[in-house]
Image (cartoon, rainbow, N blue to C red):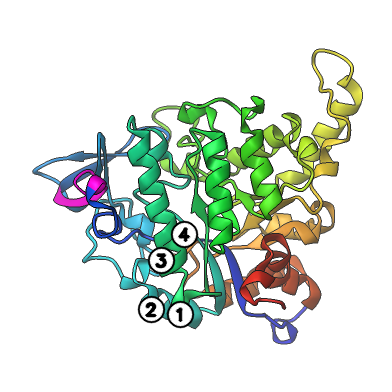
Amino acid sequence: MSTEVLEIPRIISVDDHVVEPPDLWTARMSAKYRDRAPRVERSKATVTWTGGFFAYERSDDGADSDWWIFEDYEFAVPAVMHGAGVKDVDNVPTTYEAMDPSAWDQSARIAAITADHVDAALCFPNTMPRFAGQAFAQRADKELALACIQTYNDWLIDEWCGGAGRGVLLPVAIVPFWDPELSAEEIRRVAKKGCFAITFPENPHPVGFPSLYDAQWDPLFQAAADAGVVVCLHIGSSSKMQTTAPEAPFIISSTLTFSNGMGALLDFIFSGILDRIPRLRIALSEGQVGWMLYLLERADKLWSERGSNSFGSTLPAPPSSYVPGRVWGCIFDDEVGLRLRDLVGMDQICYETDFPHADSPYPNTLETVRKIVTKAGLNDGEIYKLLRGNAIEAFGLHRFGINE
C-alpha cells in the first residue's frame, strides 16, 4: 500500500497531559486551605535512577528546578514531562520558564496540537497530582486532599477544557480513591459538569490501598458505569514500574511498561469487576495492545482447564469475552498490535500522542502515524477507527459535539 493513497484523518488523542500551572491551587482554593495548598518553590535539584523510578533531591550542586510542595510531598518538575519536540531531552529537573508554554498555557496548547494534525485530546494530570491523584490520596489530611482534588477538577473542566478548549481539550478527572463512596460522589459531580473520563490507579495495592479483588471498589466503578464515565488506567499510575534489578537502567522499565497494563487487565477481569458491572468501560492508557493477544489466549485456556479447582477462577464467561466494547488499548507505536489487529479487535484500539511528554511524536505526528499505519497495512476504514472513530465510541465524544 503506498503512502499517497492513505487518507489520514485528523487525530483524537486519548492520552495527553496538562502540566499544572504553578498557581493552580494557590489562586483558587478558599482562604481555609490556601496556606497549605500545593505550591511551587525554586531550588536546585539532582536526579538519580533508583530502579523503578527517578528520585529528585535538593542539592546546591544541582540544576535550577521548580518543586511542587504539598504537606510532606516534594517533587521536582522533570524535563521529560514537557519535552515534546525537544531533541535529546533527559529526565533532569527544570523550571517553568524553561518549558514551552504549550505545556500549561491553554491557547499555546491548542495552537500546538492543532498544527500537529490533532483535533482533540484527553488531558491527564501530570507532575503534582501524579497520573491518578496518588499525591493527594497518600496525604494524611483527607479533608484538604479532597478540596485539592475538587479544585483541580473544577479548573480542568471549567478553565483548561472550557471556553476555547471545549471539544478540543477533553477532561480526565481525578477522584478521592481512598474512599470509594466519596469517589462515586465526585464522579457524579464531574459528570454533571461535562467530564466523562476519570483516572484511577492501574493497581491500587502498591499505592497502599486494597487490591481490585476487594469488592469495596464496586461503588466507584458502578458510579462510573451509570454516568457513562470511562475509567482510565494510565501506565505508572500505580507508582510502580517493572524492572529486573536495582542496577537495571531505565530503558528496561521503559520497555516493560506494557506489563503494568497486562496486570491491570487481568485484575479487572478475574476480580469479577467487569462481570459484576457490565456497563463499565476501561481504557489501558499508554498500555499498547500487542501483548493482549497471547495474554487473553492463555487466560482463556487456563479458565477452561482450571475453572473448577484452586488454581483457576469461578468467572462465569471466558476472560476474552469481557474485552469487546468494554476495554480499549491505547497505543502510540505498537506496529505489532496493529498488524495483528484482527485478533485484538480493530474496534478496541485507540491512538494517543502523549503530548507534551518527551516520547510524543510531536511535532511530526502526521508523518509518524502515516509510517505506522502503512507498515501495518491498515486500510482507510481501519485508519479512521484507530485515529478517530474508536475514541468517539469509547469515550462518547458526541457529548462534546464530535460525531465523526
Q: CA distance from mark 4 to mark 2?
A: 22 Å
Type of amino acid under label 2: Ser
Q: CA distance from mark 1 to mark 2?
A: 8 Å
Earlier along the polypeptide chain: callout 3 or callout 1?
3
Helix, strand or loop under label 1: helix
Type of amino acid under label 3: Ala
Find out whether the residues at labels 3 and 2 contact each other: C-beta distance under 8 Å.
no
Is 112 within the magenta?
Answer: no
Type of amino acid under label 1: Ala
Could you say which disc has been placed on residue 359 in the image? Answer: 4
Q: Does the image show residue 300?
A: yes
Could you say which disc has been placed on residue 107 in the image? Answer: 2
Answer with the quarter of the image where residue 308 lies.
Answer: top right
The residue that label 1 is drawn on is 164
The residue that label 3 is drawn on is 84
Earlier along the polypeptide chain: callout 4 or callout 2?
2
Q: Nearer the viewer, residue 378 or 19?
A: 19
Answer with the quarter of the image where residue 351 lies.
Answer: bottom right
Magenta residue span: 32-43
Whether residue 25 is situated above or below residue 164 in the rendered picture: above
For the C terminus, the image quarter is: bottom right
Helix, strand or loop under label 2: helix
Q: Position of residue 186 (x, y in %)?
A: 52, 47
Residue furthest left in the image: 60
